[in-house]
Image (spheres, rainbow, N blue to C red):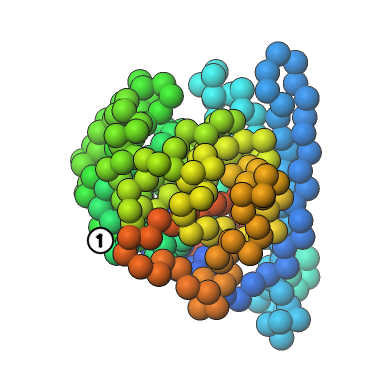
Amino acid sequence: MRIIPASDVAQVLTFPDLIETLRTAFRSGAVTPLRHHHDIALPDQADATLLLMPAWSDFAAQGHSERGYVGVKIVTVYPGNAERGRPAVAGVYVLFSGKGGEPLALIDGSALTLWRTAAASGLATAYLARPDAHRLLMVGAGALAPYLIEAHAAMRPIGEVLIWNRRPEKAAKLAERLRGRRYRVSATQDLEAAVRGADIVSCATLASEPLIDGAWLKAGAHLDLVGAFRPDMREANDEAIRRARLFVDTRAGATKEAGDIVQPLASGLIAPEDIAADLFELTRGERAGRRFYDQITLFKSVGTALEDLAAAILVFARA
């Protein structure tokens, strides 16, 4: 069995390649049982979460097993770590042979999650953001933020990036770290003005209350919501949901786990049929993405084990 650390993951992956790998994976499909989600009560800090995310190749659909794989990601989410300067998310990915079941690789799960999560947003951007989108606002300056910026920039001609964070010094630090890229980067403390001027707004936060007011979104904007992974969390308010054409990575996950979708469903603001498409339908051409230039689009991502499996197979093939 091969051990593949984060440094090797970074050496073998690029966003254009990974995004195309995810596009193929969503078109082909896989078996992805509902993830196991366990809350861990901790004293004097927010509850932690243990996630188990299995997936395997759909051998019956593919008609063969010699190239199949089985994988499972084991992840812990400790929100309180952010206040202590430690990563909030940690994990490992175990990849097995689908033919004989033997373990093939143990991959750094945190690195794999960062890459595949950002790539899923990049894939959505390919269908939902305007082709000329060049101003990106990154809301949140955590570990995922630079990956999301790169993923969006891989799909659209991003020339200007603004970064906002609850702690302005973190936004400034990330902006400084990204200087010298092919786009201009700066930090901002004016969230409303930044949203109003952005073609793409990407959010990766642990917010429990909405940060984005839908009234701020300009015509033609694309809103990418990656944080708020529990039903009691929100990154955008009801006005954003009301104004936008809605898309998700998977209907099953988003309608059960994502507060930005679960809460509007529960209140009656939207119905399940108001979700225009998921990534399966977009990549297969079964549903349309952006329909006109001034339309506001919203993509809500909660993650799926299919993304992990596809990324792990690509890493294993290249590392």
26 and 216: which is toward the camera: 216
Inspect this view and state whether residue 278 appears. Answer: yes
144 and 290: which is toward the camera: 290
Give how far across and how far down residue 19 sits, in percent.
45, 63
Give how far across and how far down residue 50 sits, in percent.
73, 38
Where residue 42 sits, quadrant-wise, is top right
Q: Secondary structure at mark 1?
A: loop
Which amino acid, mark 1?
A: Asp
Give how far across and how far down residue 31 sits, in percent.
73, 68
Q: Residue furthest front?
A: 268
Describe residue 197's horizontal placement relative to residue 147 as left or right. left
Q: Which residue is mark 1?
A: 132
The quarter of the rendered structure image containing the N terminus is bottom right
Give how far across and how far down residue 193 sits, in percent.
29, 34
Q: Residue furthest top?
A: 44
Is disc 1 surrounded by few (<14), some (14 to 19) or many (20+) residues within 10 Å?
Answer: few
